[in-house]
Image (cartoon, rainbow, N blue to C red):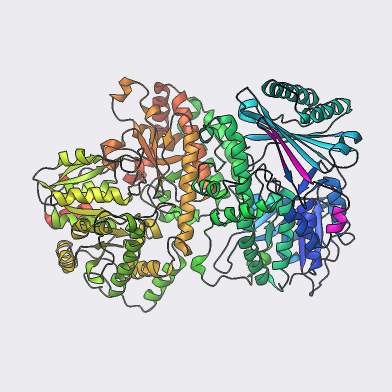
Amino acid sequence: MKECPESLSVTSDPVKESVKKESVQRAIVIGGGPAGLSAGIALQKRGWEVQIFDSNVGGSQGFGWLIMPNGVEALKELGCKDAVINKIRPIEDAELYTPSGLEKVSMSDTYCSSREAITESLTAYLRPGTLREGRLEKVNMRAATSDRGMPVVKSIKITTSQGPLKLRAKDFDLLVGAEGVGSLLAQSLNPGLDRTTRGRCHTVITAVHDGSLSTDLQGRFVKSYFADDPGGNQCCAFGMLALGKERTLGFMQFDSHVHGEAPRRAACSDNPRLLHTFLDGAMRLDELHAGSQEPNHDLIRRFLTSLQKERSPAFHTWRPVAPGMSVSVCNNAVTVGDASHPMADFTSQGVSSAFEDAVALARLLQATNNNQDVEAGLGQYNQERRPRVEGYIDAGEHIRDTFLAMNDKGAQQQVLLPFTRTGSTRAMLNRQLSASFHSLSVSTNGLRKSLARTYSGATSFHSLSIGKPDLRKSLRETWKSTQSRLLSLTEEQLEPVAAKEKEEEEAAVVEELLWQKEKGEVSEEEDDEVDAAAVDDINCRPLDAYHVNLPVLRITAYNYRWATLPPSVIPLTAASSDYPAAPCVVEAIKNSASSGYFAYAPNEGLPCFREATARYFSARLQRGQETFRATAAAPLGRTAIRPEEVMATNAAAAAIYAFAQAFVKEGDEVLVMDPVDFLLASSVRGFGGVVVRYSVTSGAPPGARFNVSAIEELITERTKVLSICNPVNPLGIAWTYEELVSLAGIAEQHNLQILSDEVWCDLVHAPRVHVPTVCVSAAAAARTYTVLGFSKSHALEGLRVGALVAPSKEALQICLAASFTDVTANGCSSLAQYAATAAMEEAGDISHGWLGNWKAHLKWAVEYTTKRINRMPNVTAVCPEACFVVWVDVSAILYPTPALQAGPAKENDLTDFLRETHKVAVIPGLEGFFGPASRGHIRLAVATSYPLLQMALDRLEAGFADWTAKPPEMLCRMGAAVQASQEPELQKRPRAEQSFRPLPDIAERPKSTVRRWFRCYR
């Protein structure tokens, strides 16, 4: 129980005086609209002490809303139904006029209300002094920790008429954000929240004072859909409702792709004239089409005439933001109404769903007595409200998409803005389930049936927890200033001294912002307090999408990453994680090390590791077979793995090399994908084999991503192995059952062994599911050697632990003998095996626990990156089905002319330019890294936090623009100047840091078997 201030007095310093009230729980509500007022009423009824702050108490109250049957039911539970209903007007009939005729729908328990009627009625039910003026200015968040299941609001700052007011977490039990779509609390809970992107369907709303018109519209909702040509294609709609005895509301909805955007200035003096001209023209077209004046046109013309008589008519333009329910709760805070879930147009559920939010929130918090109860109640609230809200949104999106489709003439999916979910799996499913849902069945029993179908199709929305909310704003402001300096550099400014000073300045800025401790924001006492709330399993806690430990990364993350680059450079380079491993991994290493014994492990690996790997991979076999079992055209492959078919290896790379040592002889040919990670090719060359490339592409649909005939033409009598990367790094392809059956068939026909590299198997993004190669057919089961690793899926790269799964115990012995573990020249650390065992057994699965949260974050990262890349001029990317790397096609900016296309490779020039001038490091598409087909590409590894990824992509976009805009000779001079300025420092750095150039071909190294093994492996 928190200290509960009896009155929140504000003085000039400012100082808050509080009085302990141990028996009362306290809530601070931000926003005095229907959502905030109803939340306050509901909580007060449950015994909470509530203070509501609104920035515009007594100010302009806008127009009005529809209250739907579910909203009326919620008002009844709040105890204020009669008080509200008595002040507003019922709607008994809806009249829809379309080019096809009139449709009339009876309505029940549906009302139209002015905003002031609702707010005045609700305010009267609050205790005196509950509502006061104030604006939320700042929210300080603390990220989730091992002692806390969700982030927590540490403190807030509210600006009032008497001065600033600062409240800490100990001053309130619950913070409620109800201040609409611009909610600061919602932004703090969702650092990547997009409340700026506007939808395609815009609405202009106004009202007139005309008693006669209002009387004629009493009990009616009249809406007209206009035809824009004799073919009857709809271009806009206009609706009218009576707000009271003297006031009538009118609203026009239209497709901004056809008619342009709604005016941003709601008070524009031209609005009445524009609206009149627009609607008069639309009605004339309607009459031309119908051959006579429709009865609703007289009502519309009366409205327009009254509008011309208004002295200063008020207008509101609604350009809706992306609908959807964002992260709405943390340890001690919740958002409700539009702050949590802006509704799609056509839902008519904005106010009604806010009332439902209030009722559900108070009911689930009724029995809370401490912070742990509040956190649990908020978690239940989120689970209960999400499917219902998403059902409303999906129903509204279906209606809106139907409206827009009438304009598109079948082309709607190509022109809808990216934030609409039209075309997505979920929206398509919901549209199928609610195909009979009509725009005005929302007040009848049809609503319940339609929404029931919609609810059944709704999928759960996986959210990311967040950390410091102020950091994102600081990063954006800082980057804007530094970006402008970067992009305005001249040749003179690139002199050595200036470049060095700039690099030091950038390093200081990034270091300070990305690892700040919020100095001065909270007291040490508050910083050290331990929250009572906890989650049973710390390995199930949500990932902190907002924070990574940069000081640790800068001294530990090598391999082209933080420890090898200047501090101001953000690396999207090696496919490694910026996040720590699961807590269970750390605990396993501690437990193993605590005994003080570090004995040799068995050559083939610890029994516990081999057993865990067998269970782990068997589960993936069964999950993969579930995707094709019913349609399989051939006998299935392996359904389970035995421990005696598993060997532990010193990372997945060692498993690949052990296979190559066992099965690749001098002159043998091995089929290797192009493009693919260099390890497969380098292992073949390391043992005297010949790499034969077969082409794969991510731009084609499944079944057309490789050519079976072309692969077979590459096979000769010297071909011994078909290698498969499943999923594919760098393309992000997750192979389907049919594709793997085709590859296995090639191997069977030509008696080839199959090496399947499946280190990315746990990072296949929904709705795709990983299909292991060995499980697709009997042919695959008999000849497939599978490589597993834990560096990508569980962030264990530095522990150097992997596994090789052979077709049989006897086959495994061949690989074991080739690996030199029997002479202790190779082998996997016991500590690493204990850690990997814990990761497999305790870190969850692909849909839950640490692994599920990690996978969800990576899915967001690749989708966000792909979307950003495809908005940049002249570069493209295909959204990966798997992995956390994005393969970017930059050929249009590298080779814009035939002469450049025929010239030398420029990928290294581009990546050097980006790293040195725009402070973002990426991997070039060089043949030594990925094969010949990588020309014209770069690879981005995006396993990092939201602010770092956003900043890196901002820099990348600026770098692409700079590279394209400046002539080649200027780029050469800039590069030379930068190189000269940093040459002394480069000489001191490790060689790998100086440039992203692959190591010499392994085949050129000494031939001694053991020496060759260690050199190529190292």
Is residue 978 left or right of 662 when viewed as pictured?
Answer: right
> In the picture provided, is 350 more to the left or to the right than 809?
right
Quick check: can you spot residue 267? yes
Residue 910 higher or lower than 62, as above or below? above
Decide if residue 498 is in sight here.
no
Instruction: Report the residue at 75% width, 30% height from top.
Output: 265
Q: For residue 888, which quarter of the picture?
A: top left
Residue 136 in percent (x, y) is at 75, 51
Q: Residue at x 88, y 62 (%)?
A: 127
Task: From the top left corner, tell me how far across and down residue 434 is, in percent.
Answer: 57, 48
Pinpoint residue 569: horizontal percent, then vertical percent.
46, 43
Side of 589 relative to 153 (left or right):
left
Nearer to us in this view, 515 or 575: 575
Quadrant where the image shows the N terminus: bottom right
Query: Which quarter of the figure has residue 24?
Result: bottom right
Magenta residues, start to end: 81-104
Give x and y (percent) for residue 317: 73, 34
The C terminus - image quarter: bottom left
> Is residue 155 left or right of 987 when viewed as pictured?
right
Residue drawn at the location 42% of the way across and 64% of the way down: 845
User: Measuring 47% from the left and 39% from the top, which residue is drawn there?
Assistant: 919
Q: Is residue 842 magenta?
A: no
